[in-house]
Amino acid sequence: MTIPMIIRINIGFLPTVARSKLINFLITQFQLEQSYSDNDDIISLNTTSSIQTIKKTVESILTEICEGYIITENIHAENEIVVLKKGDLEQLDIYICIHCGMPFESEGQRSIHQRIHYF
C-alpha cells in the first residue's frame, strides 16, 4: 500500500489565464476538494502519485495551455514543484543541467555534474 503525501505545485509565476486553466485541470484530474482561485500561488495535492508522475501530468497540460514555461522541483522546499518561465530559474537560485534536467543549488554544482555527461 502506498502512503499518501502532500505535493505542492507553485503556480505563482504563471499568467492568470494559464493559472486558471491549470487549476481547473488539476481539480478534475485529482478530484481536489479544496477550492482554489486565480490568486492562489500554491496548490496542494494529497496523493499517492510520485512527484515525477505529478510533474509529467502538469507538463502535459502546460504544453497545451501556455508556451515558454517549464516545471522543475523546488530544491529549496521538499515535495514542491514550481512552474517557471524559461530563463527565470537562475533568478531563484535553481540551476538546471542542460543534458538531463536535474536541478542544482549553484552554478558550480551544475558544472561539476555536467562533466559526467561527457565521460
Image (cartoon, helix red, strand yellow):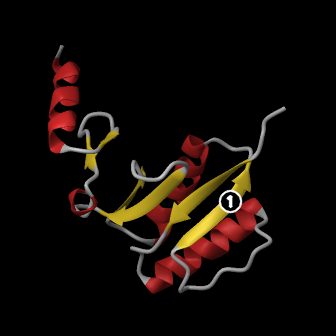
Is label 1 in a helix, a strand or a loop? Answer: strand
The quadrant of the rendering that contains the C terminus is top left
Measured along the vertical axis of the image, is residue 62 above or below residue 3? below
Q: Position of residue 118 (x, y in %)?
A: 16, 19
How many labels, in total? 1
Mark 1 surroundings: few (<14), some (14-19) or many (≥20) residues within 10 A = many
Measured along the vertical axis of the image, is residue 3 above or below residue 85? above
Instruction: Please name the residue shown 23% across and 28% down the image.
Output: 113
Name the amino acid type tagged 1. Leu
Residue 12: quadrant of the picture: bottom left
Q: Residue furthest top?
A: 119
Q: Is residue 108 left or right of residue 62?
A: left
Q: Position of residue 39 (x, y in %)?
A: 53, 86
Residue 26: quadrant of the picture: bottom right
Instruction: Please name the residue shown 51% across and 75% down the image.
Output: 41
Instruction: Please name the residue shown 52% across and 54% down the image.
Output: 80
Q: Is residue 102 left or right of residue 11?
A: left
Instruction: Please name the residue shown 39% across and 73% down the image.
Output: 13
Q: Position of residue 42 (x, y in %)?
A: 55, 70
Q: Is residue 55 left or right of residue 45?
A: left
Q: Residue 82 or 76: which is nearer the viewer? A: 76
Measured along the vertical axis of the image, is residue 110 above or below residue 10? above
The quadrant of the rendering that contains the N terminus is top right
Q: Is residue 21 left or right of residue 111?
A: right
Q: Position of residue 71 (x, y in %)?
A: 42, 55
Q: Which residue is under mark 1?
A: 45
